[in-house]
Image (spheres, rainbow, N blue to C red):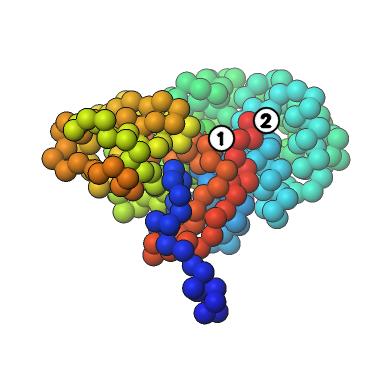
């Protein structure tokens, strides 16, 4: 770096708040560690980009060995394809003519795959495959216990697989579930026992990622949050505070009483997500004041209860908040500050944020 450029480099603390800041050294360590784990256990890694929504980090994941990426929405996939990503799985049911049109446009350019759990999604993807003039690979999603999407019986999976195989415009690639659990193994075995060849069995979830190799039958890991980690993952023991790469920097904008501080980060900055089924209360962890509790949020205000904190932050002080759920925080911000050693490396537009279609 030239001297002039070096002089222009800013300390992260000079960037106005509230602002999400990522530490690129921690990001890289998290990426290398997960890829190393997948490689050691002969598992394919297909990272979910929902956590970072940044093409450059998706490209880095592929450079390190990921077989492709996962997107929840077509809008995210369009951004990633424009940036040069290939082999994208949409892990969310696509329904309707307009989705088919956009999926077809993507499938003409790159390899696309889609998860389905119902006949209408099957029809949508098949239509896209016919329009694109090349079959789209389908994973049949089954429920491993989350009770969200996914067929709930082996019989239903076999019926849908038969429909996929018979449909024009589709190729059958295998199964998908989220998150992987002990139930995954039994389900996969039963489908294999019915004589179905399963090139891909895609499982997922960062909380259980360190045990992915123990779930027999799974061939592929779809993990997202591992790139940044967050307070939820620390709470469940899947990450340490040192593994957390994204913090929201905030400022104490008011100190109305001895035991109350107001931060400039409310629900528009931290989201309203609490820790699911967690023991830790509050809307994020104040790293330098762990006994303080962000107990209420307005859109732009974070109310901090200091009654249990011997140390109390001063008016105007800058604080770091570890978010409860980092993926939604990413989605709330137009830009993220990329840093290394406390210095700004860049201010990156979160290109794939806010794309709900
Ligand atoms: C379908 C699907 N696959 C994979 C993931 C990645 O999970 P995690 O962020 O826990 O790694 C998610 C996260 O919500 C998901 O919904």
**Residue 56 appears anywhere in the view:** yes
**Front residue (pair 287, 315):** 315
Specify few, some or many for label 2: CA neighbours under 10 Å numbering under 14, 14-19, or 20 or more.
few
Q: Is 165 rendered above or below residue 78?
A: above
Residue farthest to the left?
A: 310
**Residue with the mark numbered 1:** 176
Label 2 beta carbon less than 8 Å to ligand 1: no
**Residue with the mark numbered 2:** 357
16 with respect to 58 (left or right):
left
| Residue depicted at 70% across the width and 20% down the height | 119
**Residue 276 appears anywhere in the view:** no
Q: Quarter holding the C terminus?
A: top right
Of labels 1 and 2, the one closer to you: 2
- Answer yes or no: do the residues labelled 1 and 2 have beta carbons within 8 Å? no
- Is disc 1 placed on a helix, strand or loop? strand
Disc with the residue nearer the chain's start (1 vs 2): 1
- Percent across and percent down for residue 172 are 69, 36
Q: Is 180 rendered above or below residue 6?
A: above
Label 1 beta carbon less than 8 Å to ligand 1: yes
| Residue depicted at 65% across the width and 40% down the height | 76
| Residue depicted at 73% across the width and 50% down the height | 82
**Front residue (pair 259, 249):** 259
| Residue depicted at 47% across the width and 21% down the height | 147
**Front residue (pair 339, 105):** 339
Q: Quarter holding the N terminus?
A: bottom right
């Amino acid at each position: 770096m030239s001297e002039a450029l070096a002089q222009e480099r800013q300390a992260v603390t000079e960037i106005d708040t509230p602002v999400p800041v990522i530490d690129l050294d921690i990001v890289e360590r998290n990426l290398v560690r997960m890829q190393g784990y997948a490689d050691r256990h002969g598992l394919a890694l297909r990272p979910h980009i929902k956590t970072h929504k940044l093409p450059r980090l998706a490209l880095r994941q592929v450079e390190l060995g990921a077989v492709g990426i996962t997107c929840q929405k077509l809008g995210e996939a369009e951004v990633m394809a424009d940036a040069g990503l290939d082999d994208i799985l949409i892990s969310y049911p696509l329904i309707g003519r307009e989705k088919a049109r956009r999926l077809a446009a993507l499938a003409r350019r790159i390899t696309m795959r889609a998860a389905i759990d119902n006949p209408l999604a099957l029809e949508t993807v098949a239509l896209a495959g016919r329009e694109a003039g090349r079959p789209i690979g389908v994973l049949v999603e089954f429920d491993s216990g989350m009770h969200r999407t996914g067929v709930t019986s082996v019989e239903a999976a076999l019926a849908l697989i038969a429909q996929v195989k018979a449909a024009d415009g589709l190729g059958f690639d295998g199964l998908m579930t989220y998150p992987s659990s002990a139930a995954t193994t039994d389900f996969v075995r039963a489908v294999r026992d019915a004589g179905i060849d399963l090139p891909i069995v895609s499982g997922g979830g960062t909380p259980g990622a360190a045990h992915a190799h123990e779930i027999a039958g799974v061939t592929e890991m779809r993990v997202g949050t591992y790139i940044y980690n967050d307070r939820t993952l620390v709470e469940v023991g899947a990450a340490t505070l040192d593994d957390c790469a994204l913090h929201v920097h905030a400022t104490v904008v008011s100190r109305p009483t001895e035991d109350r501080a107001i931060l400039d980060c409310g629900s528009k900055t931290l989201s309203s997500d609490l820790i699911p089924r967690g023991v830790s209360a509050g809307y994020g962890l104040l790293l330098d004041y762990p006994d303080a509790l962000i107990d209420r949020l307005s859109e732009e205000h974070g109310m901090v209860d200091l009654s249990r904190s011997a140390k109390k932050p001063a008016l105007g002080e800058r604080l770091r908040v570890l978010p409860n759920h980092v993926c939604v925080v990413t989605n709330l911000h137009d830009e993220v500050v990329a840093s290394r050693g406390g210095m700004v490396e860049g201010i990156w537009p979160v290109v794939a944020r806010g794309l709900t279609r």
